Image: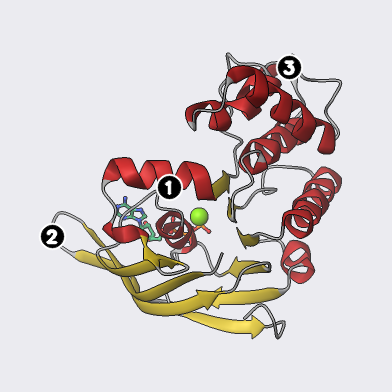
């Protein structure tokens, strides 16, 4: 699925002034590619990712999944759309603490209406894929940081979303654990042929992606490096 923005603008309104984080951004992210978004702290990278994934609403402009403008969907339709098409991975895993790894990964499918037995079966297969078949019943608090992030990756991909959005997915891990998680994310992106957009401060992770774009003040994106098929 191709994801694009048209004249995308996001302005935060504080008490007495407007903060224009993204202004009139139009860009196309083709399907089946991996893109790193880099840029200094506070520039608007997370804001952009949240808009792309429908976690937040633009002030104006369009966000197109193929031809569908998700900014025009009602709240209910947008959450349904998100559940079917978007996988999120955050810096901190955001797993549900009282549920097992298996239940956490099955959750997106159950929310989509998949019968529980089938959801658990699919979750088991994905946890096996990320190397955690021995940790199915562990709650997040009993997993290591790297394992927690692998569960979060499994949860993001279990419903086979067309888009995976990751916000500093390995920022909280030590170098070698971060490398493993990065590798896994890229492998899964290639296996599923989806679009992977990753915000990262890691030059190593950015280098491993097809393309790198740098965010500028006002939310413009300049291409630092582009693979012909990806940008
Ligand atoms: N809900 C909000 N209300 C007002 N201002 C906000 C809000 N969310 C973010 N901002 C401001 O918008 C700007 C962009 O924030 P954002 O979180 O997108 O930056 P970032 O590039 O992800 O930074 P970092 O690399 O530190 O995560 C920041 O100046 C921030 O203070
Ligand atoms: Mg951020």
Compute the Cα span from label 2 to label 3.
Answer: 46 Å
Q: Earlier in the sequence, mark 2 or mark 3?
A: 2
Q: CA distance from mark 1 to mark 2?
A: 35 Å
On residue 81, the disc is 1
Note whether residue 140 is visible: no
Give residue 147's quadrant in the image.
Answer: top right
Toward the viewer: 212 or 107? 107
Q: Is residue 83 left or right of residue 202?
A: left
Residue 49: x and y in percent read 48, 58
Residue drawn at x 55%, y 70% as measured from the top left: 39
Q: Residue at x 77, y 60 (%)?
A: 190
> Percent x, y for residue 17?
17, 64
Which residue position is annotated with label 2? Answer: 16
Task: Give residue 162's quadrant in the image.
Answer: bottom right
- Give the structural element (helix, strand or loop) at label 3: helix
Q: Are marks 1 and 3 in contact (CB under 8 Å)?
A: no
Farthest left residue in view: 16
Judging by the rendered image, the residue that carries numbered circle 3 is 142
Alpha carbons under labels 1 and 3: distance apart:
32 Å
């Amino acid at each position: 699925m191709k994801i694009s923005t048209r004249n995308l603008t996001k302005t935060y309104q504080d008490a007495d002034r407007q903060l224009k984080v993204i202004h009139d951004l139009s860009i196309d992210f083709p399907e089946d590619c991996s893109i790193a978004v880099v840029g200094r702290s506070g520039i608007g990278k997370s804001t952009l990712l949240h808009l792309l994934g429908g976690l937040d609403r633009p002030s104006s402009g369009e966000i197109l999944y193929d031809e569908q403008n998700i900014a025009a969907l009602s709240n209910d339709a947008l959450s349904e759309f998100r559940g079917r098409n978007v996988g999120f991975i955050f810096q901190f895993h955001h797993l549900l603490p009282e549920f097992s790894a298996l239940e956490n990964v099955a959750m997106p499918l159950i929310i989509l209406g998949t019968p529980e037995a089938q959801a658990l079966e699919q979750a088991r297969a994905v946890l096996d894929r990320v190397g955690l078949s021995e940790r199915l019943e562990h709650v997040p608090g009993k997993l290591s940081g790297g394992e927690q992030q692998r569960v979060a990756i499994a949860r993001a991909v279990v419903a086979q979303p067309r888009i995976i959005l990751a916000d500093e997915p390995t920022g909280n891990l030590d170098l070698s654990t971060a490398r493993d998680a990065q590798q896994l994310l890229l492998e899964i992106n290639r296996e599923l042929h989806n679009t992977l957009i990753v915000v990262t401060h890691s030059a190593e992770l950015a280098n491993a992606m097809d393309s790198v774009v740098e965010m500028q003040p006002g939310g413009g994106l300049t291409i630092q490096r582009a693979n012909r098929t990806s940008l």
